[in-house]
């Protein structure tokens, strides 16, 4: 039974102690290299001394066009070979090594990183515990003089050769800030660094090869795709290694970030700070909304429920083919439903989605678009009139895509018509997908609120109750987190429902649709100009209130000054009153003394 991990909390796994277990998985160590024969010799010497069994290890050195060509030194693991990759570029070299790898686990290793002798074993003990892990070791950066390969192979502790060295500061900081990546699973994929990371080969096959279009940031982008494929990221402090010299990023961080961010912003929706533009489109959207047939119960009768689950990467040929056939049938049914429920319902939903406060969105409308034909002579009598209107209305809207089938959970939608490269079955799915029945209209901020809820609660599925009717049953929208459904497909047990596996690994929430602003009717759209006017009016009101606040503050200052004067006058008055009281008291004494003297004189005269 496959172990189940909640979020990125791998602490429930119990990997064996180093040296106290018997491994069985094969590992392919992929070392892309361009020149640097002296450092490569040390890397291979370190690999030759590993405690992980040599019979379960292959090393693939990818020569990325070195002049002179790289050679294999005398001290190297037995299963070492060179693969040539003349196309320049790190991603091309990595992909060439990946294509040649035959192991159950692929261990990326830079050609200037020397592994501690127990490093691969420390990696592999985790991969024996669960088949969907990405494990990263701890690098230290050394400027020590390079030793001989014989010394490296014979040394039990590389610290004796390479210390003092600097830690991989940002990685250590990330791990410490997030409780070992368990407190913030949304950023865990950043741990995937190509210098010393190992990944389950099946997980890599699901995520796809490195993006060769990227100039920099390939490791992070692949880490993001691994996360969407269900990966759990594990930092392993016992997997130690020394990087021979500083990295390019350590030398030139600011220009490296500038180049990297220009490309990865298009491909990593989770980096929200790189997508501050309020209107532009991105290669991989943050949210994809699948507009499904109106009135069809959203899962709580899920589209393609059993067939799609069977085909979710489980490697079962019969179930996979059955899932495809059933998905195609349901896509055709959805297209017929779209026609019956009509252009107006679909337009109300799609337009509201596009006009909302989430600009980083794409819409998928599934249906039998390959069978729909326009009628030139009698268009109003065309039985396909409704889907023809839908297709015609959104044919040139870049954020709306058509598909023959509703996309399977955790898989990218296959657009129709396909591009020049054929159906992008291996495309990147967005991190969130909302399945929404046509005719149900979200409020302007409804989607943003749902996304905030899903992210804050870190749940895998948010079901939105739209209506509950004895005739139709439950009608619901579903906000699916791609990483959660991919993980659930990996750990799915026989006869288990996919939603149950999602609930067990990430959690499921139900919310009321009306509370979140979903209504079964169209409503006026504010539009960009209306939003601009509202923003301008709000800014004008803010300016007026700011001016009024400043006026009131000035008035308060005057009142305070006046109050100060009053307090000063009161003090002076108190002093005057005190003086008068003293004078009055003195006068009273004088009067009393004079009166007493007069009385005494009068008494004396009478005697």
Image: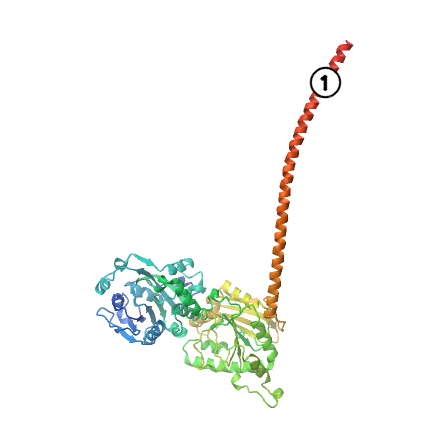
* Residue 368: image location, x then y, percent: 53, 83
Q: Nearer the viewer, residue 235 or 600?
A: 600
Nearer the observer, 582 or 217: 582
> Residue at the bottom extreme?
377
SS class of the residue under badge 1? helix
x, y (%) of residue 284?
Answer: 47, 72
Query: Where does the N terminus fall, quadrant-wise?
Result: bottom left
Q: How far across and how far down the image is residue 382, in percent?
A: 60, 87
Residues 89 and 446: in front is 89
- How many callouts does the rendering have? 1
Q: Is residue 142 visible?
A: yes
Instruction: List x then y, in percent, for residue 203.
Output: 39, 72
Side (left or right) of 551 relative to 182: right
Residue with the most extreme right position: 606
Quadrant location, the C terminus: top right
Q: Which residue is mark 1?
A: 594
477 sits left or right of 212 in the view: right
């Amino acid at each position: 039974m496959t172990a189940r991990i909640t979020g990125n909390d791998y602490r429930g796994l119990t990997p064996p102690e180093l040296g106290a277990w018997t491994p069985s998985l094969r590992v392919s160590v992929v070392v892309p290299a361009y020149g640097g024969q002296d450092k490569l010799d040390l890397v291979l010497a370190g690999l030759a001394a590993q405690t992980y069994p040599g019979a379960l290890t292959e090393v693939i050195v990818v020569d990325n066009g070195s002049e002179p060509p790289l050679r294999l030194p005398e001290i190297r693991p037995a299963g070492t070979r060179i693969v040539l990759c003349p196309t320049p570029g790190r991603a091309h070299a990595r992909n060439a090594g990946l294509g040649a790898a035959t192991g159950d686990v692929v261990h990326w290793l830079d050609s200037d990183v020397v592994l501690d002798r127990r490093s691969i074993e420390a990696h592999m003990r985790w991969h024996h515990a669960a088949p969907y892990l990405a494990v990263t070791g701890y690098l230290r950066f050394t400027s020590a003089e390079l030793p001989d390969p014989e010394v490296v192979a014979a040394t039990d502790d590389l610290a004796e050769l390479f210390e003092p060295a600097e830690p991989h500061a940002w990685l250590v900081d990330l791990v410490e800030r997030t409780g070992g990546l368990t407190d913030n699973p949304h950023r865990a994929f950043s741990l995937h660094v190509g210098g010393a990371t190992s990944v389950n080969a099946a997980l890599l096959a699901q995520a796809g090869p490195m993006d060769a279009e990227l100039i920099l940031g390939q490791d992070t982008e692949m880490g993001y795709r691994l996360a969407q494929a269900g990966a759990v990221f594990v930092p392993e402090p016992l997997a130690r290694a020394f990087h021979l010299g500083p990295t390019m990023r350590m030398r030139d961080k600011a220009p490296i970030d500038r180049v990297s961010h220009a490309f990865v912003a298009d491909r990593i929706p989770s980096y929200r700070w790189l997508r501050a533009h309020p209107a532009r489109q991105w290669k991989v959207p943050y949210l994809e909304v699948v507009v499904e047939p109106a009135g069809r119960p959203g899962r709580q009768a899920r589209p393609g429920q059993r067939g799609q689950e069977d085909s979710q990467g489980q490697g079962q040929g019969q179930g996979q083919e059955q899932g495809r056939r059933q998905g195609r049938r349901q896509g055709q049914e959805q297209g017929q439903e779209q026609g019956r429920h009509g252009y107006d319902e679909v337009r109300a939903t799609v337009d509201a989605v596009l006009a909302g406060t989430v600009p980083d969105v794409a819409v998928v409308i599934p249906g039998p678009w390959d069978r729909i034909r326009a009628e030139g002579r009698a268009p109003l009598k065309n039985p396909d009139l409704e889907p023809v209107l839908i297709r015609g209305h959104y044919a040139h809207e870049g954020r709306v895509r058509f598909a023959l089938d509703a996309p399977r959970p955790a898989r990218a939608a296959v657009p129709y018509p396909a591009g020049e490269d054929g159906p992008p079955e291996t495309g990147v799915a967005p991190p969130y997908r909302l399945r929404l029945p046509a005719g149900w209209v979200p409020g302007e901020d409804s989607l943003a609120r749902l996304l905030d809820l899903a992210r804050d609660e870190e749940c895998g599925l948010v079901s939105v109750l739209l209506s509950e009717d004895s005739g139709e049953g439950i009608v619901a929208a579903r906000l699916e987190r791609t990483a959660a459904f991919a993980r659930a497909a990996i750990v799915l047990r026989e006869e288990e429902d996919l939603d149950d596996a999602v609930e067990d690994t990430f959690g499921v929430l139900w919310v009321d649709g009306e509370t979140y602003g979903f209504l079964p009717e169209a409503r006026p759209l504010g539009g960009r100009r209306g939003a601009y006017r509202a923003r301008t009016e709000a800014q004008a009101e803010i300016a007026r209130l700011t001016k009024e606040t400043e006026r009131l503050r000035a008035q308060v200052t005057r009142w305070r000054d006046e109050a100060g004067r009053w307090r000063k006058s009161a003090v002076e008055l108190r002093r005057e009153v005190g003086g008068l009281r003293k004078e009055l008291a003195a006068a009273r004494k004088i009067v009393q003394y004079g009166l007493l003297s007069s009385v005494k004189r009068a008494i004396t005269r009478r005697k």
